[in-house]
Amino acid sequence: MSAAHEVTDATFADEVLNSSDTIMVDFWAEWCGPCRAVSPILDAIASENPDKIKIVKLNVDDNPQMAMKYQITSIPAMKVFRGGEVVKTVIGAKPKPALEADLAEFLA
């Protein structure tokens, strides 16, 4: 299982929107192969950058409200939040160097 913390429709506001941290939400589903492929990469990025970015996971099957609110139509979809606002969106599974490049502004 992932090292990333699970959030739900019920906890999303408290844990993501009301946080002062930079938080990446990984929108995923159990049946999604690319989601499972990218999960350990996200875990590695989170563990290597604990003071820069926090990564949480939201299962779109179990939490449809947030998936609809943020117009998640393709997974894996990762959205970076700062101050309750989406500041970056990354769609699809990518190798670690590509994800790190996408997140460079937050990991610097």
Image (cartoon, rainbow, N blue to C red):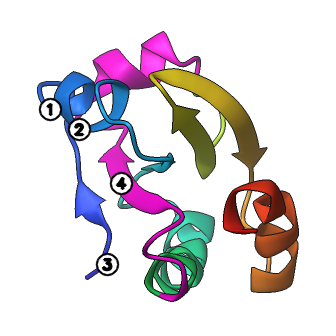
Q: Nearer the viewer, residue 26 or 82?
A: 82
The residue that mark 1 highlights is: 11
Amino acid under disc 1: Thr
- Residues at badges 1 and 2 in contact (C-beta under 8 Å)? yes
User: What amino acid type should be assigned to the residue bearing mark 2?
Assistant: Glu
Q: Is residue 73 visible?
A: no
Q: Residue at x 29, y 79 (%)?
A: 3
Q: Element under label 4?
A: strand
Q: Decide whether residue 62 is among the magenta residues.
A: yes
Q: Which residue, given by chain and number where applicable, does mark 2 sit on?
A: 15
The residue nearer to you, when weighing 3 against 34, is 3
Q: Up-down: is 93 above or below 69?
A: below
Q: Is residue 51 above or below residue 75?
A: below
> N-terminal of the two: label 2 or label 3?
3
The residue that mark 4 highlights is 57
Labels 2 & 3 near each other (Cβ < 8 A):
no
Q: What secondary structure is found at the residue carrying circle 1?
A: loop
Question: Marks 1 and 4, how far apart in space?
Answer: 12 Å
Element on which disc 3 rests? loop
Circle number at residue 2? 3
Depth-wise, is mark 1 or mark 2 nearer the camera?
Answer: 2
In the image, residue 101 lies at what x, y percent? 87, 68
Residue 14 % position (x, y): 18, 28
* Amino acid type, residue under disc 4 in the picture: Lys
Q: Residue at x 72, y 38 (%)?
A: 89
The answer to the question of whether label 1 and label 4 lie on touching residues, with beta carbons closer than 8 A, is no
Left or right? Give the position of 67 relative to 108. left
- The answer to which image quadrant residue 18 occupies is top left
Chain part drawn in magenta: 48-71
